[in-house]
Image (cartoon, helix red, strand yellow):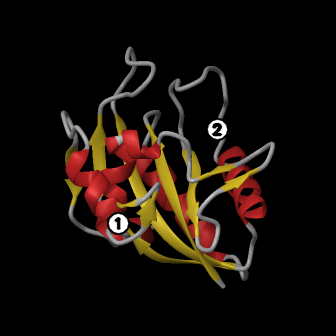
Amino acid sequence: MRKAWLGLGGNIGDPVASMGKALRTLHRRSDTRVVAVSSVYKTPPWGKTDQDWFHNACAEVETLLGPEALLATCLDIEKRLKRERLERWGPRIIDIDVLAYEGEETFESPTLELPHPRMTERAFVIVPLADIAPQLVVDGKSVAQWSALCDRSGIERATDDTGWWRAP
């Protein structure tokens, strides 16, 4: 099993419920288990700012899947949860990104780039990731260091309960 870190978010319907369902779906698989989950954060939209605020979280998983297979699994879960890709950075019911993968400090394919592009610039990724992986090194700095450097304007912790994803 190898470790991987995922970013989850959404701003349509009940994004916390959607993220929880996605994590439970991953955890039930024989090849992947969820080992740590951050708090949920309410965050302002990024990129396309004329939309509702998001709820974001990060998770650490252990998996037998390679990076691209893990991404394909995450995209399949998004599809089953009725994710529609209508516009870049637009509203969504669920978004699951593979942020980093143990042993693959950098990885590039037609479908996946690791570490996830611009993740160190995005407080909605770095702040929740620092909850579960402060020592993880991304682009030469620990996530804790990136978290200390990022602009946290508007970011609010929505829950301190890291077991939020387990509730049905």
What is the three-letter code of the residue carrying label 1?
Trp
Give the percent coordinates (x, y) of residue 162. 31, 70
Examine the rendered structure and indicate whether residue 34 appears above or below residue 59: below
- Choose top left, top right, bottom left or bottom right for residue 124: top left
At 63% from the left and 58% from the top, the residue drawn is 106
Examine the rendered structure and indicate whether residue 9 appears above or below residue 99: above
Q: Nearer the viewer, residue 61 or 139?
A: 139
What is the three-letter code of the residue carrying label 2?
Arg
Examine the rendered structure and indicate whether residue 145 appears above or below residue 1: above
**What residue did someone put label 1 on?**
164
Q: Quadrant of the N terminus?
A: bottom right
At 26% from the left and 43% from the top, the residue drawn is 150
Q: Earlier in the sequence, mark 2 or mark 1?
A: 2
Q: Real-space Cα distance between discs 2 and 1?
A: 21 Å
**What residue did someone put label 2 on?**
83
Tag 2 secondary structure: loop
168 lies left or right of 70: left
Labelled disc at residue 148: none
